[in-house]
Image (cartoon, grey):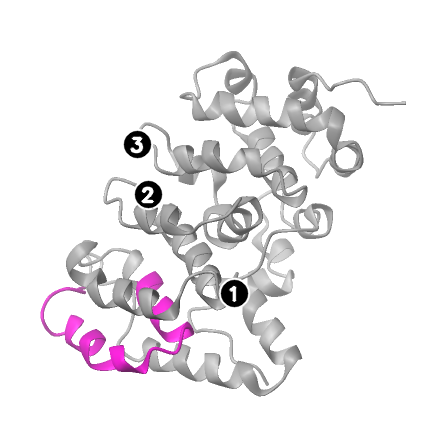
Amino acid sequence: MTAAAFDPKDIIARFTAGEGFPEADVRECLSTPSASVPALMAILEDRVAGGTGELSQLDEKGDACFLALHILADLKVTAAFQPLMRLLRSTDQDLEALFGDCLIETMGPILIALNPGGYSVFEEGFSDRNADDYARDAMMVAWVYGVLSGEVPREHALSVLKAFPKTVRPAPDSYLWGSYIGAAGDLGFEELEEPIAKLFTDGSIMMDEGGFRPVDPEDFALHLEAASLSEENEESRELWMASNRYFPFEDTVELLGEWSWDGDEDEWMDVPFLEAAEDEEPYLPN
């Protein structure tokens, strides 16, 4: 017997009641996708429409949208891909307030999981100067995954990365410079070493007013080394891929159940690949 379709308002109420992770409700959504997916999509699409609709107003802090998105990715609901891309490229919503650390830790894997095919959309996305830098980083992660999986030709990827400083031209203190240099190193493009070094001397990459630089000159070599070491065996490669977010999102309960739901970072830092993702240096396999 097919389960009755869930009411999105009820899902929001259940996802936002109390302070803990709503494990039972999340598991129910995962186990009955035919009933839950329409409601989860409604929550996401209402947010994409501007965040002023009835569902988004009920989900004031965005917690339900946050959970809905992860569940949709876990279920590989590719219909959620285009709405999510529109949301990530929107300029009228505070994505960092809506998704928090998810923008860095899980948004790349979510895009990988939801992508119905094709990677040029990510090139367009991370080239969009009006989009949030963290959202652009997630798009670059998903694009690099496409290169690593063979869906994007390496020759094309090298061409894109060679042109990046001029075609994309992030602000000198943009977080996206770290994404770019990480991508170039992770893909093993040693021929970009000299052009990347020049970015630190020609004013392309500079410190912000607080003295923070988005990436350091030695980071490219570190990424190259990590990528090379990861090829020693299958286990190292899998760990490297996971620690650099190059995988389709899955296991919502296992991952988000460990995430802090009360602001205590120590709680979610125990999640292995999230801890690695927060590190300032790339993952180096033992």
Callout 2: helix, strand or loop?
loop
Q: Amino acid at mark 3?
A: Thr
Q: Are marks 2 and 3 in contact (CB under 8 Å)?
A: no
Q: Which residue is mark 2?
A: 132
Mark 1 or 3: in front is 1
Q: Which region is colored magenta?
A: 178-206
Mark 1 to mark 3: distance in Å?
31 Å
Callout 1: helix, strand or loop?
loop
Outermost residue, right side: 1
Total marks in image: 3
Q: Quadrant of the C terminus?
A: bottom right
Q: Is 7 drawn above or below residue 189 in the view shown?
A: above
Mark 2 to mark 3: distance in Å?
8 Å
Name which of mark 1 and mark 2 comes first in the sequence: 2
Mark 1 to mark 2: distance in Å?
26 Å
Q: Which residue is mark 1?
A: 149
Q: Quadrant of residue 70?
A: top right
Q: Are marks 1 and 2 in contact (CB under 8 Å)?
A: no
Magenta stretch contains residue 183: yes
Q: Which residue is mark 3?
A: 91
In the image, residue 234 lies at what x, y percent?
64, 79
Identify the residue shown where x is 33% and y is 51%.
123
Q: Amino acid at mark 2?
A: Asp
